[in-house]
Structure formats: C-alpha cells, structure tokens
Amino acid sequence: MTDQTEYYTVNKVSQLTDVTIKTLHYYQKIGLLIPTKIGVNNYRYYSVDDIKRLQEILIYRTMNFSLNEIHDILNSQNNDSRIYRLEKQLEIVKSQMNNLQEVITTIEQSIIAERENLHMTEKDMFKGVKKDDDVYKSM
C-alpha cells in the first residue's frame, strides 16, 4: 500500500500561507509545528493536517496568545478535537469583537462630548476599556 497523502515542502507552505520559512523553522525548533516527514535530504514535508495546525497557531497568535500558551493548548492531555478548538477560538474572537465594539462606542461618545463640550460620566468614559492591574506585570 502506498502513501497517498499530499505533502508540501517548507517553501510551498510558506508560499501558500505567507508565513516565512524562518518562522516555520522556529515553530519546528520549539515543538509547535513538527513536519510530518523529514526526508533523507533534511527537507521538511508538511501534511494537510500540519497546515490545519498552522492555521490554528496563527489564529491563536492573532488573538494575542503567547507561543507557550498555544503549545500548551495544542498539546494538552485532553487533546480536544480541532472542531472544539476552532469553536472555542470563534467564541473568544466574538467576545473580543463585542468588547471592541463597546470601546468604539466609548471613543465615539468621547469625541462627541469633546466637540460639543458635553460632560461624560466617568462610568461612560471607561466602558469597555481594560482595567487590569498593571502593578503586578513585569515590564
């Protein structure tokens, strides 16, 4: 029985996804995206499943997850299905989108208040903005 799986070289993956070869090599180095096959010529060969994993990695990066967090999520013991992870990603992005819409509204209302010399309550001035305690974060 022959292997009917389609494989892509690192160059092809880079072309298809606009991810640099350097990044793909780095993802391999840190164990985030390991090519399915490595040829005797040391060429990396990526499968369709590898491309799907890269998509998930980049979605998490877009959501500002660290590479360590992404590694932990994708390699967790419970090994959630791709569909489950994608559904969670969608849920998080929709939540972020709703929050950003609230920030947009706050900014728009602030502009109107400034232009028309109106008073905005402090509560309205801070709707949707981050109020994390930065004291405990390292610089």
Image (spheres, rainbow, N blue to C red):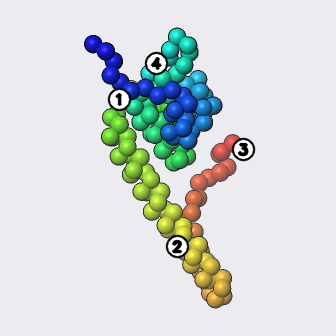
Q: Position of residue 31 (x, y in %)?
A: 53, 24
Q: CA distance from mark 1 to mark 3?
A: 34 Å
Q: CA distance from mark 1 to mark 2?
A: 39 Å
Q: Nearer the viewer, mark 4 or mark 1?
A: 4
Label 4, on which residue? Answer: 37
Can residue 53 be seen here? The reply is no
Label 3, on which residue? Answer: 139
Q: Earlier in the sequence, mark 1 or mark 3?
A: 1
**Other residues around mark 1 within 10 Å, as few (<14) / some (14–19) / many (≥20):** few
Image point 27% across, 13% down: which residue?
A: 1
Query: For this rendering, which residue is in front, 69 or 50?
Result: 50
Q: Nearer the viewer, mark 2 or mark 4?
A: 4
Q: CA distance from mark 4 to mark 1?
A: 25 Å
Q: CA distance from mark 2 to mark 3?
A: 30 Å
**Other residues around mark 3 within 10 Å, as few (<14) / some (14–19) / many (≥20):** few
The kind of residue tagged 4 is Lys
The kind of residue tagged 2 is Thr
Can residue 115 be seen here? The reply is yes
Image point 37% across, 43% down: which residue?
A: 86
Q: Is residue 79 left or right of residue 27?
A: left
Label 1, on which residue? Answer: 78
Secondary structure beneath dot 3 equals: loop
Label 1–label 2 contact, CB within 8 A: no
Q: Earlier in the sequence, mark 1 or mark 2?
A: 1
Q: CA distance from mark 2 to mark 4?
A: 50 Å
Which image quadrant: the C terminus?
A: top right
- Residue 14 lies in what quarter of the image? top right
Q: Position of residue 4 (x, y in %)?
A: 32, 22
Compared with residue 138, is residue 103 higher up or lower down, i.e. above or below? below
Q: Earlier in the sequence, mark 4 or mark 1?
A: 4
Compared with residue 9, is residue 124 higher up or lower down, i.e. above or below? below
